[in-house]
Amino acid sequence: MSDDVVATLRTRLRGSVVGRRDAEYDTARALYNGMIDKRPLAIAQCADVADVIAAVNLGRESGLPLALRGGGHNGPGLGSVDDGLVIDLSRMRGVRVDPEARTARVEAGCTQGDVDHATHAFGLAVPAGIISTTGIAGLTLSGGHGYLSRKFGLTIDNLVEADVVLADGSFAVASETQNPDLFWALRGGGGNFGVVTSFLFRAHPVSTVFAGPIAWDQAHARQVMRSYRDMLPRLPEELGVFLGLKTVPSTAPFPQQHWGQRICLLMCCYAGEESEGRRAIAPLLQQLPEPWFNWMGMMPYPALQSMFDPLMPKGMQWYWRGDFVKSLPDEAIAAHLEQAARTPSELSLMHLYPIDGAVHRVAKDATAWNCRDATWSMVIAGIDPNPQMAGTVTRWAKAYWDAVHPFDLGGAYPNFMMDDEGEARIRASFGDNYPRLAAVKRHYDPANLFRVNQNIRPAA
């Protein structure tokens, strides 16, 4: 069957088709998360929208499971599927910036770095994540949060329209005025409703930022976390600060005397001038002891976005769990510190990303992203390059999540969920918006063709 699928696809696509007999098959099927190994029948490396339409039609006609791959950064490996067809958009990487309208038209195979590179030339930025290798499609469709969220909202709050190939092979534009129900669902509902081939984003005047990490010995983490919790609502929205419980990597440029030591990190970005940024962060730092290092300085926004890239290459062992967090009582902080003291590897971590400010000014039913009253999006990630550590980092991440989840909300950012968490977690993540999402799914994908994802089943 694999040979038949590959042969048929090759007659219909301008892009490349990789099958199991091809020398490049293992390279083409490799996933960002090295813990996951899937063997699709074929990988359709689409060159354009026509290729996407052809691949969707063949998958539907053949009854094959379809997986959608954009930038390929998905943690649970949902960009591939055993014995099915992968629609790979990673070669569709065009970005067109309109500096007067302050918009960017972005093809779905782009990484965040592609977008940052294109918009930075015009002194603009699209609010997105914190690692430049992240695929913009997967990040956007699940919401998208990062350094600029407090000021400019989620990535979906800056989405103007999207081009979509639907399950029947037809093409649609989704916006506030065209297919508004589909547009609503795409803003947080993931890849459940079609193959988005391009996005139109609003961009904002962000060029050089005052940014960087500030790290304390984890012995001070209780004080840092309490001060961060209490000060965050009073910090200017131009200042994005996420908190991490981490380990200093044993590599340059980190100070060698601190290699392998556990830290509490504040990763900061002030979208403005250095003098303003120093004033913005000062009230928080004045409450805290002297850090081990403070590397905040002026830098181009794309430099900040790519700062973590060398530490997170493709092919690492990953297991992560997430939660939405509304409050951080002292009891929760104690649970965090107990678990963080047991990190099994230098790269394993916990991050709290702020999703307040502008995110809260959007009604919870305005988009599929439901959790507009949370303060943070949390991720716990067990990470190691050694495949023999897969079980260890997985057990640690699960135990950490079990310990802190009672203090958190019921759902999580879908991109921080694995595919072993069950439908109840998906429903909790969408909350009151789930029934409407299921109704939109029934309209646009009644047979659930697009189900290799954090799946929303069509309403009965």
Image (cartoon, helix red, strand yellow):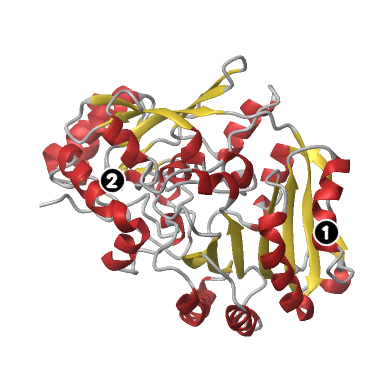
Total numbered badges shown on the rendered structure: 2
Task: Point out the frontmost of discs 1 and 2.
Answer: 1
Residue 437 x %, y %: 26, 47
Determine crowd level at label 2: few under 14, some 14-19, many 20+ residues with C-alpha closer than 10 A.
many
Residue on which disc 2 sits: 192
Please state which of residues 396 and 211 is positioned toward the viewer in this rendering: 211
Q: In this view, does 146 lie above or below 399?
A: above
Q: Residue 283 carries which label?
A: 1
Secondary element at tag 2: helix
Q: Is residue 7 left or right of residue 14?
A: left
Q: Residue at x 73, y 65 (%)?
A: 265
Q: Which mark is residue 416?
A: none
Q: Residue at x 43, y 40 (%)?
A: 70
Residue 353 x %, y %: 59, 58
Q: In this view, does 37 lie above or below 169?
A: below
Name which residue type carries label 1.
Answer: Pro
Q: In this view, does 182 lie to the left or right of 188?
A: left
Please state which of residues 358 and 134 is positioned toward the viewer in this rendering: 358
- Which quadrant of the figure has residue 78? bottom left
